[in-house]
Image (tube, rainbow, N blue to C red):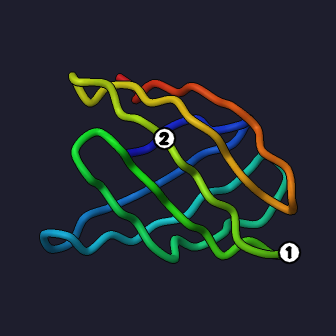
Amino acid sequence: MVAEVAAGAQDLSQHVPGAYTGDVAPQGQPAAPLKSLTLDGNHLMMVFDAPDGEATFDMVVSADRQAFSGNISYQGQTIPFTARKRP
C-alpha cells in the first residue's frame, strides 16, 4: 500500500503474514524505515526510525480498509491526520 502522508509518501509491503517492511518519506526528507507495525482489529500502530528519533503513527483504519485517521507523534509533537489509499 502506498499512501500520501503529510505531503510525502508511505510505502509498506507484506512479504509473509505478519511481517511488514517499508518506509515513510515526508516531502524533502530522507525515508525513515519501518521499525514495527501492529494491527489489532481496526487499530493500527506503526513506528518508524526517523533521523531525529522515532515517529509513531497511531490510527484507526476504516471498515472498508480504504482510509485511516489518527495522530503522528514525533519529537514531542502530535499532529492529527487523515489519509486515503490511492486508487
CA separation in Å, label 1 and label 2 = 22 Å
Q: Residues within 10 Å of mark 1 (few under 14, many from 20)?
A: few
Image coordinates of residue 31 in percent, x first then y, are: 68, 66
On screen, 56 above or below 83? below
Residue at 13% of width from left, 69% of height from top? 17
Between disc 1 and disc 2, the foreground one is: 2
Residue 74 location in percent, x, y? 78, 58
Mark closest to the chain's N terminus, 1 or 2: 1
Instruction: State the image quarter where residue 63 is shown.
Output: top left
Residue 3 drawn at (x, y percent): 49, 38
- Badge 1 element: loop
**Callout 2: SS:** strand
Q: Amino acid at mark 1?
A: Asp
Number of residues whose C-alpha sits closer than 10 Å to that of mark 2, classed few (under 14), some (14–19) or many (20 or more): many
Q: Which mark is residue 59?
A: 2
Count of marks placed on residues = 2
Q: Is residue 40 left or right of residue 32?
A: left
- 27 relative position to 43: left or right: right
Q: Does 81 sit left or right of 23 as displayed?
A: right
Three-letter amino acid code of the residue under disc 2: Met
Name the residue carrying label 1: 52
Position above or below: 50 against 5: below
**Residue found at the very far left of the displayed protein:** 17
Look at 25% across and 64% down and name the residue there: 14
Disc assigned to residue 24:
none
Please report contact status of discs 1 and 2: CB closer than 8 Å, yes or no. Answer: no
Nearer to us in this view, 29 or 62: 62
Instruction: Answer above or below: position of 38 versus 63.
Output: below
Residue lying at 30% horizontally and 55% vertically, measured from the top left: 39
Q: Residue at x 52, y 71 (%)?
A: 34
Where residue 87 sits, quadrant-wise, is top left
